[in-house]
Image (cartoon, rainbow, N blue to C red):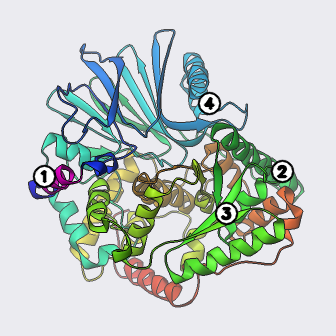
Amino acid sequence: MEKNKADEIREILVKYPEYREALFCRGYLVTSRVFENTDGYPFYGQWKIAPFGKLLDGSEVSIYCHKWQSCNIVELEGVKAALIGHAYNPFDMKYSEPDILHDCIKAYRKGRAVFFDKVSELTGIHVILLNDKGNLLALQDCAGMRACYYGKQGKDIYLVSHPRMAGDICGLDIDPFVKELTGKWFFRYGWQILLGSLSPYKEFRKLGCNTCLEFGTQFSVRRFYPVKPHPELTPGSYDQAMKTIAGLIRNNIELSAMKWRRPLISLSGGTDSRTTFACANGLYDRVKCFSFHSKPSEVIDAGAAHEICEKMGVEHRIYPIPDTNAQVKDYEILRKIICHNISYIAIPHENEIRKYIFLYRLNDFDVELKSWISEIGRAIREKRYGMKFPEKLTPRHFSIFQTRYMFAPRLLRKTDGYYKEYMEEINLEKPLYNYEHVDFHTWEFVFGFWGQGVVTSHDIFRHTVTMPMNNRKIIDMFLWFPHEFRKNDMLHRGVIKHANKKLSEIDISVHNPYIGGKRVFLEKAYYRYATMFNRSPE
């Protein structure tokens, strides 16, 4: 094990015990291992423990949750169900997790298909677990924002939110391949995610969204969504579908206002947050808006958001993040804890670290409503590259979308092999039904893996983060519309118009720096090189 890293964090937390709560904050651990002492590293008395039945071999299972993390457990008809995180249902307007879990168990009793359909109604950031007489089942929210890593060490099983926590507990060494990949200079030029189901350790794997994890005597993963082709809308049905989407997002915002006392929408001048803001129409007395800025481009975003709110007569707060590390108390201490929490992968820039620490200390609201999940429905990958992709993606596409492998052909080919194996494992080696292959890459890899890493780093915030569009059925409805209609943001503009006509007429917007110009030219050039001269396994 990399004792120097864990030991350094231990030493820090001996000297600064007030920051013990920040270690693996909002985390969870489901395990058959019994910890005799939870007052020491990494728990420090900050975690709650709840029993969760037995495995087939008779071992007791417990759920450990950080004090800021919510965990609800119910038992019905011999089945235990747990929901770690939060959930709410815009289809029946339920927001109590115990009530939702009762509905999930009832659906499970009717069959797996009914159960998977029920959990697909849920919005939020969560992991749902079932224990049916020793057989475990686990799955994530729509885009897998609540991470789930799993593995077995000796006779004990582990399902955990933070792989580094598992590595520290079990005394594991970093996978040499992961160490090589993340140590390359070009790794930071991309999404900075580990490929496929890889974790920092060979002994653990990562669960992806739209798949479920089962354990009886060993772990297995299988896809549960989608199960059939999606409807293909014609122009005559666009308006009704957009109206339905707007209504469901509004339900989610209303449920957030019922569930939390002080909800705020994170607003910029961009399309995604503007859509959420529009759908809050009629709730502006209960849901306010805020922006922050930690770099020049965010100052522009925050200014646009403020101008929009002024025209709409809605309260908007702007939080300027300190410009230098010296302005942040114990910056270096908290930076090290944050980096440890994310396993030293996708290390945030200094301005991001300052923002995380600022929001760790801020207590102005209970929940932040984020919007970027809606990019799944905007054909965003094609926008970033300024080109159309083939109907069927190869492992090479997945590799180069992840990281720019500059002058490392051996590493690129090895990555291709990993992706080929993983795509076959989760049944994604070709498009699913009439869904676009590239849309599922955005859904399950960009947001499912990059997004969950971002959320994990956000877990240090004092407030909860939720996502009103992180709902499998809502995202599915986005994909019913034709590609070009989505790519040109006609779908999002239509949803905004149905939700709030006044907002749709306000001509204030900001340019997305990741779309257009020099960046697109470079992305396209690398794509051409990597796919034309270097072939991946089919």
Q: Helix, strand or loop at disc 2?
A: loop
Quarter of the figure with residue 491: bottom right
In percent of width and height, residue 157 lies at 25, 30
Looking at numbered disc 1 in the image, what kind of residue is underneath it?
Asp
Q: Which of the two discs, 3 and 4, sits closer to the camera?
A: 3
Residue that carries the numbered disc 1 in the rendered image: 173
Using the image as rendered, state which of residue 430 and residue 295 is in the foreground. Answer: 295
Residue that carries the numbered disc 4 in the rendered image: 118
In percent of width and height, residue 443 lies at 53, 56
Looking at numbered disc 3 in the image, what kind of residue is underneath it?
Ser
Using the image as rendered, state which of residue 265 and residue 402 is in the foreground. Answer: 265
Answer with mark 4 or mark 1, whichever residue precedes in sequence.
Answer: 4
Q: Indicate which disc residue 282 carries.
A: 2
Residue that carries the numbered disc 3 in the rendered image: 273
Left or right of 442 in this view: 171: left
Residue at the image position 48 percent from the left and 64 percent from the top: 393
In space, the residues marked 4 and 1 are separated at their CA atoms by 39 Å
